[in-house]
Amino acid sequence: MSRVQALIAPLYTLRRILPLLWESSRKWTILGALLMALEVAFGLAVLFMLKQLVDVVTQQLGSDAPVEGIRSVLRYVALTGGCTLAYLASRAMSGLAREAQGLLVADHIDREIHARAVRADLAFYESPRYYDTLQRARQAGNQRPVQVVGNLMMLIKNGLMLAAIVVLIITINWLLLPVLLIAIVPALMVRLHFTRHLYEWQRHRTQMERRAGYLDWLMTSDINAKELRLNQLGDYLRESYSDLRGVIRRERMRITQRRTQVELAVASIATLAFFGALAYLAWQTSLGHNSVGDLVLFLLIFQRAQAMGQEVVRQLSQFYEDHLYVGLLFEFLDIRPAIAEPVRPLPVPEPMHEGIRFEQVGFHYPGTDKPVLRDINLRIRPGQIVALVGANGSGKTSLIKLLCRLYDPTSGRITLDGVDIREYGLEEYRRVFSVIFQDYGRFAATARENIRFGDIRQPVDTPSVEAAAVKAGADPFIQELTSGYDTPLTRMFDGGQEISIGQWQKIALARAFMHRSNVIILDEPTSALDPGAEFDLFDNFRERIDHRAALVISHRLSTVRMADYIYVLDQGVIRERGTHDELIRQQGMYCDLFSRQAHHYREVDA
Ligand SMILES: Nc1ncnc2c1ncn2[C@@H]1O[C@H](COP(=O)(O)OP(=O)(O)OP(=O)(O)O)[C@@H](O)[C@H]1O
């Protein structure tokens, strides 16, 4: 980007900010702009009236009509006072409007960030780039857009005032103009340079900041508190944290030191220029080319021009900085999901007739080349219970993510009743499934809400919550909580209660049972359940799931046994398929795994 482009780029940012302000608070945007315009107008009017007042007083010196003169002086005093009052009132009101607008815009931006965050592809959450972009958007701050506009108005006001002073200086001696430029332009260049430099450094260091933030969270949250204490990781984490903060602090200090040095040099040059100009003017005055009045005016005005110039420089660099940081906010807001909604979505068949098919499906995660799934052909018929078996990392969860369209296959296709699932509306298609993943959610909400989240469209007091809890075996322990279904879970908020991991899993199961979906997907649904609870769950599983289709992943082959059809996944490829009895007869991988697990039980039986 050329320097000129870099300088005008903030104006393009404005083009995006203004609609944002308009959308979030029309009333305050109009009112704020009007009040700020009044503030600028009255600010300039005060200056003008003062000048008029001085002129009138000067004219009165030695005038023959003192009474007339005093009236006119008093009129200007009253006008100046009136304008000052109006300026103060409009400034106070425009401050109020800015504050109100700021609060509304901040909330609007938070809502926009949340809207993008909840719709972003799962892939974003699985990439550091997403977190970097989010962190930067947060760093940019939700007040920036309002700041930009406020700052721009002040810039216009001060720019106008500076222009007025420059005109005055030129009337004294036009040769003083370059001196003023020397006092202002290098300072502006230096500021812009360091603003950009600091911005780029912060961008580059986002991940290190995030790492430090992560360590801070590890040390202060309850998530890993047990391991942290038992493995005595506290000191190690504290040291790592202070190492990271040390690097960040030192780098930042280096930039600040360098900036201070350069700014000092620039200020010294400006001061030298000022004294040079003063010497020149004094010389010209002594030669009679300028009056003593010029010299006094120069001393009064030049200082003011320099101060005003510095203010304009500060505001320009602030404007530039805001533009850079608002850019980070827009970078996040521009994130669009790659899991595309079809232009003309087909209605999802209800109920399904043929079921779901994977046809030659292949997949690797974005940003990696390693194939996680290869040539997958798999079928789930309506009402059929299908089990997926395989070692850790064989691709079972990835297959579910494809099925729910959290990712799209890199080759092949998945169909529902013969139609590629990419042809269906995304939300409607996802409603075909109710899923519990291994890392199911534990929400800091009541037990009732935790279950109702499985189908949020149901009313708050729906009896389906209790029915789902009964099916999942969660009802007895929920009844015993202090406020039953209305007990807040987790200790994050007042009155909250913690429950055991197995009990959380039953709540997650209830959430899956809550939704009247076509297909239930359970990824390791019983890993934390006691054998009795597991037996109860699968004893009459088909009735429990109302004869819907199910896809169950489990390492416990006693669970898998009840499935109608079993797929054995190994390193992303389906190695075996069939019913339990067929697979046992095949004497392959499944049979081997099953015999090994069964062996332990036989030992106990013996
Ligand atoms: N978000 C991701 N990005 C890149 N690779 C991933 C991601 N998630 C999983 N993988 C890789 O994909 C492979 C399959 O993972 P997957 O979670 O599907 O296995 P799994 O069969 O469900 O294992 P487990 O039994 O341990 O749950 C693994 O090699 C894993 O490293």
Image: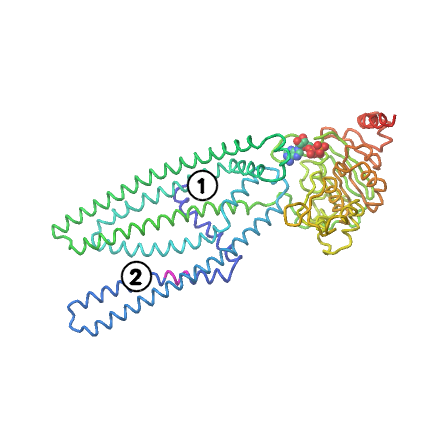
Q: Seen in the image, is 394 located left or right of residue 290?
A: right
Q: Seen in the image, is 74 located left or right of residue 394?
A: left
Mark 2 secondary-structure assignment:
helix
Please indicate, yes or no, whether residue 129 appears anywhere in the rendered image.
yes
For the stretch drawn in magenta, what is the main secondary structure? helix
The image quarter containing residue 214 is top right
Q: Seen in the image, is 553 located left or right of residue 50?
A: right
Identity of the residue drawn at 17% across and 67% down: 61
Q: How is the image coloured?
A: rainbow
- In this rendering, the answer to whether 73 lies above or below 309 is below
The image quarter containing residue 122 is top right
Q: In the image shown, does 176 or 113 lie closer to the viewer?
A: 113
First in sequence: mark 1 or mark 2?
2
Q: Position of residue 534 (x, y in %)?
A: 81, 38
Q: Position of residue 457 (x, y in %)?
A: 71, 54
Please indicate, yes or no, whether residue 362 appears anywhere in the rendered image.
no
Q: In the image shown, does 357 or 501 lie closer to the viewer?
A: 501
The residue carrying mark 2 is: 47
The residue type indicated by label 2 comes to: Leu
Magenta region includes residue 556: no
| Local crowd size for mark 2, using a 10 Å CA cut-off: few (<14), some (14–19), many (≥20) | some
Taking the image in four quarters, ligand 1 sits in the one at top right
Mark 1 secondary-structure assignment:
helix
Extreme-left residue of the structure:
287
Q: State which region is magenta.
A: 36-40
The residue carrying mark 1 is: 199
Q: Seen in the image, is 372 located left or right of residue 330?
A: right
Q: Position of residue 4 (x, y in %)?
A: 39, 44
Magenta region includes residue 37: yes
Separation of marks 1 and 2 at Cα, in angstroms = 37 Å
